Image (cartoon, rainbow, N blue to C red):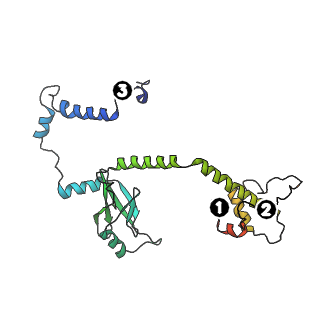
Amino acid sequence: MKDYNPKRDAVVRVSEFLELLHKWIIDLYHQSPDARETGIPVQRWYESKFRPSEYKSSEKEQLKIELGPVHHRTIGLGGIRLYNMRYESKELIEYRKQNSLDNSGKLYVKTKTDPMDLSYIYVYLENEFRYIKVPVVDNTNYTRGLTLFQHKIVEKVRRLNTRFSADELSLAESRLYIEERIQTETNRSSNKKRPNVKVGSTSKLAKYHEVGSDGPTTIIASQSNSQPPKSTEQPLIEEVDWDDESEDIEGY
């Protein structure tokens, strides 16, 4: 139906629908005679000569490896980082020691994950043509019985909690303070008459204010002809020589 909106008109939750669907397939459809009443699906299943083999032990584990999501990661001194967790084993570290790194100083490997269990991953050792099972470094038992879907939900909730925990008022005040100090130093640098002004400092300040060939041609704020009298009060914060300090500041 064109006018049907599942988000608005649905009366059954997805989880309930899937449970009822499985119930209908297994307990109703498979147990009922077909339309011609020549057989029952579940009996046909047991009588078939082409029943699929059941995977056990090593074959079952190999199937998990073949069907698992693929990632390519580097082996660091502390193992492999994946899903914001760290996986490490003695065998993995020994493999890193015995194999040469690439030109960038890294050693890449292919990993496979069992989506139903994040307490370990499979790492393919290319030079040895085999997978090894590497456990997660977990001192809190967080990954016990943890699925990939559950972990993604937990990570999303953590990010939301972090975002809502930030003091936005304090952050805004800090940003305004930095802007005012930058503008003050920009004006001071432009008004200070000396022949040997460091170009690097001014250019970095210009980068901060996004001044360049595509933007405004000057970082000097518009001023009236009459200069305001200089204040004799001591500054609240000690003046910093930005000509030296800003040498380490890079524009984004």
For the residue marked with disc 2, what is the amino acid?
Arg
Mark 1 vs mark 2, CA separation in Å: 20 Å
Between 183 and 249, the residue placed more toward the observer is 183
Q: Mark 1 points at which residue?
A: 251
Which label's residue is closer to the chain start, 2 or 3?
Answer: 3
Q: Mark 3: which secondary structure?
A: loop
In the figure, 131 relative to 221: above or below? below
Left or right: 163, with 35 as reference point: right
Q: Residue 11 carries which label?
A: 3
Between 121 and 63, the residue placed more toward the observer is 121
Residue drawn at x 75%, y 68% as measured from the top left: 199
Q: Residue 159 carries which label?
A: none
Residue 170, image x and y in percent? 60, 50
**Quarter of the C terminus within the rendering:** bottom right
For the residue carrying disc 2, how many other residues have a C-alpha within 10 Å: few (<14), some (14-19), or many (20+)?
A: few
Q: Which mark is residue 188?
A: 2
Mark 2 vs mark 3, CA separation in Å: 67 Å
For the residue marked with disc 1, what is the amino acid?
Gly
Residue 60, image x and y in percent? 21, 54
Which label's residue is closer to the chain start, 1 or 3?
Answer: 3
For the residue carrying disc 1, how many other residues have a C-alpha within 10 Å: few (<14), some (14-19), or many (20+)?
A: few
Residue 186, image x and y in percent? 75, 60
**Quarter of the N terminus within the rendering:** top left
